[in-house]
Amino acid sequence: MPKEKTHINVVVIGHVDSGKSTTTGHLIYKCGGIDKRAIDMYEKEAEKMGKGSFKYAWVLDKLKAERERGMTIDIALWKFETTKYYITVIDAPGHKDFIKNMITGTSQADCALLVVAASTGEFEAGISSKGQTREHALLAYTLGVKQVIVAVNKMDCTEPPYSEARFETISNEVGSYLRKIGYNPNGVAFVPISGWSGENMLEPSDKMKCATGKTLFEALDYILPPDRQTDKPLRVPLQDVYTIGGIGTVPVGLVQTGIMKPGMTVHVSPANITAEVGSIEMHHEALFEALPGDNIGFHVKNVAANKLRRGMVAGDIGNDPPKQASSFLAQVVVLNHPGEIRNGYTPVLDCHTAHVACKFSEIQKKIDRRTGRSLEDLPKTIKSGDSAVVKLTPTKPLVVESFREYPPLGRFAIRDIRQTVAVGVIRSVEKKETLNQPVTLKISLKKFYLKDTISSVFGRILYKTQYINTSGIVQNRVHCDTGTVMRRRTNVYFCRESVDTGNDIANELNITYNINFVLFCGNDVIHINIVVIGHVDSGKSTTTGHLIYKCGGIDKRAIEKFEKEAQAMGKGSFKYAWVLDKLKAERERGITIDIALWKFETTKYYITVIDAPGHRDFIKNMITGTSQASIADCAVLIVAASTGEFEAGISTNGQTREHALLSYTLGVKQLIVAVNKMDNTEPPFSETRFKEISKEISSYIKKVGYNPASVVIVPVSGWHGDNMLEPSDNMRWFKTLFEALDSIIPPKRPVTKPLRVPLQDVYKIGGIGTVPVGRVETGVMKPGMVVYFCPANITAEVKSVEMHHEALPEALPGDNIGFSVKNVSIKQIRRGMVAGNSKNDPPQDAISFVSQVIILNHPGIIHTGYAPVLDCHTAHVACKFAELKEKIDRRSGKTLENSPKSIKSGDSALVKLIPSKPLCIEAYSQYPPLGRFAVRDMRQTVAVGVIKSVEKRTAAVPKVTKAVQKLTSS
């Protein structure tokens, strides 16, 4: 991006449905940031979903969930240009469920555009104590956004339209509130607009006499240019981290202070990692230097992506690099806490991009919030309205700075019980000294070693092995004796560990030995995928984490580290769950939110295990997890044996039933049931309780479609590890969970079918190009193949294929891959599309399809015209029930009624469905993974179905990329 104009960041905030995304999208369009054809396309898509008024909002609301729900969930970035500035606009969510994303967006801004709705009722809802207008404005000021513009939107909806009196009323009330939180209303521009019709945005409106001041465009040009602190040491809080084969690790974040240049050596804290910056980009343009205010991605050399994470901070190794805080002193203002706060209170702090629980170690004194005068030393409690100086201790590594030295890293918000309860600024920080980094030494051995000679050469040492089977599946395992290496093609990496030298343990090595050798191959181990499902708090993550630990998938020191972190947060029993629950929100709430992937090895199989969330708020993630992993080959259903917990899970509102049903519907035909928490029965390890639960579970899964005779039901204690690998003395009456996993029937991979790869995500990396990510469901993909993307109607050549950061000569069914394609824009393909071989039955989009649908739990009667959302493979699309063809017996398939007027819960019917937007699906008989679906409405699964036949659109002449043209001509 050229630097002639100053670059500033504007965050758009306000109550849900105030029109933020519509206003921002229209402004971007009017300023030339997007062309008319794109707006026309959004309008058509919106009208198909019955949301025609959302065409401008869809410029920013790209997530499917946002478009379907009609509100912003995640922050969205876009750019446009005014007379004075290059502006990156950040559209932040208004719904209170997504306030954390709003905090992230606001913490990066120079000015806030507060959008309030002028229509009767909407303004009052937003400015109320429970509305987001107040909370967003307060957070903006707390997070250091000192300039604000207020856009009074929906002026066309006032009574009468464009009412000057209504505008003045709103301006006075908002101005009064802004004064209370710290803004000077005289420095705030109030602009009346209509975000939908565009009134008073770029040009003055004839319809608004109240608009005697500026247009919105002019108000943006009146923003005072920010003081960029280029003379301070570098600080870049990481927003996210990506890794791309051939490029490496790419952290993303906003430069807060200092300058970053290619070739600079940066230190990332608290990871305690140093690395050279290879290149820097902003908005896909290479930069020779990044200045404060720039949203950048920068490539760092020789650093794995799993070593870095959001909330860490990068700095210049040669100029006051950032350091981890052991504790810090802050002035805290308690805003809205329902009780009294005492020493030991451990809420979550949002500081820059970090989201970390911190303990109130010592409330040092209560002070006057305006004068700073001490009111009381060492108070026992503080409450709403109080201001205090508090010593805080992070529960896990955190980088913060004093507000005086680095303002963006020295202010924070405290959220609890789904609201902002306090805000604060950091006065001083006690920092930990940084340890020196180990040196890496690479040694290449020219010799081949057989299994029997490894021990004599290397002795006893901790090391990690990496196995690669015929499908290209990469697996890691930690060992302590070199003599135990299996007969497989193996790479062995000697880790930075202790070496056994007789009776003494040598000091920890500062050198990492990377020694590669090859063993002669025996039989390759089969790779299978299992998904762990069940009701919330049934112990899924704990059981899975303990199993991974017992199978050698993670070492004892990592478990001990998790235990210490969990105890620091008062959650000591979560140490095994934290193997999988990596998200901050999961650890703080103690529930799984997103799907987690891990891998371990049994006697027969390499297993990729997927831990799916049990909480009903995250059922969509559970569907994604269950339908992934080449459709999971087996589900492990965890049920809690303790009194009350099993009954809650198996109830009509519990997730035990819904998860089992969804697993069967989504094609998981093998099931293991683990009856967990057997140590909590009355009496402990009660065989009677186990048999009672087994009987009820068997009865339900039979109704779903499973054969109970082929379902293994295993009693376990996920916390203590009873009956997991070895038979338990407490429960010698059944096989172990480990044995049950080895009894899974190995899957048949459909390599002979035409290629189908539903896209899970799409990335764009400078120097590489567009990289779609997905799972091969059928067929084989190879570099050099020409693939066809449906329904995008685009062909492109595959440049390379990777899995787990390893290049593959071919990708087989079950492989989770990223593949680089030439000359395709990231805007042209998206999640839910399907890639296939352009020369072998390529996929086509559906005009309509006939399905057998089973209505499970719909509260009313379904008629023709019902348009719910279908989850099919990775697609999430609204489809209309165009025709109810016949009601049928769900078991025999016999017709009960032709052309029924309606169907209801319990009914099974043949239905013709029409997608509301382009969708690629297949008949279940031909491509099972693309031929089954779940129907969700009202936060529950209301129906499931399989596709009988598809009416496909005649394929148009595809858009052929230059690479394909060149390949064809040659």
Image (spheres, rainbow, N blue to C red):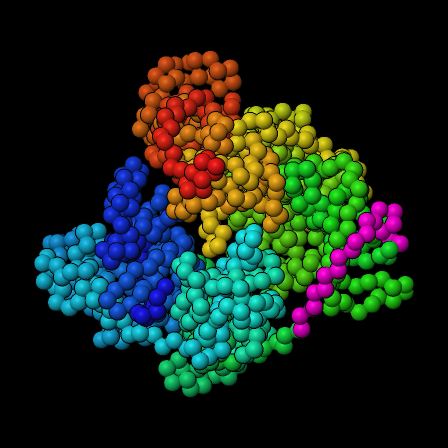
Q: Is residue 179 magenta?
A: no
The residue shown at (43%, 65%) is 287
In this view of the protein, can residue 638 be seen by the observer? no
Q: How many marks?
A: 0
Q: Quadrant of the N terminus?
A: bottom left
Look at 55% across and 44% down and name the residue there: 800
From the top left corner, tell me how far across and down residue 463 is, in percent.
76, 55
**Residue 218 visible, this angle:** yes
What x and y, as percent, mark residue 96? 38, 56
Q: Is residue 437 magenta?
A: yes
- 330 with respect to 434 (left or right): left
Most foreground residue, 458 or 864: 458
Q: Nearer the viewer, residue 565 or 878?
A: 878
Residue farthest to the front, as pictured? 970
Above or below for 260 versus 536:
below
Residue occupying the point 35% across, 50% down: 61
Residue 17 position, x and y percent, is: 29, 52
Q: Residue furthest bottom?
A: 373
Q: Residue at the location (45% across, 86% down)?
A: 374
What range is drawn magenta here?
436-456
Image vertical order of residue 721 relative to residue 956, above or below? below
The residue closer to the viewer here, 7 or 526, is: 7
Give the camera-side residue of 394 and 531: 531
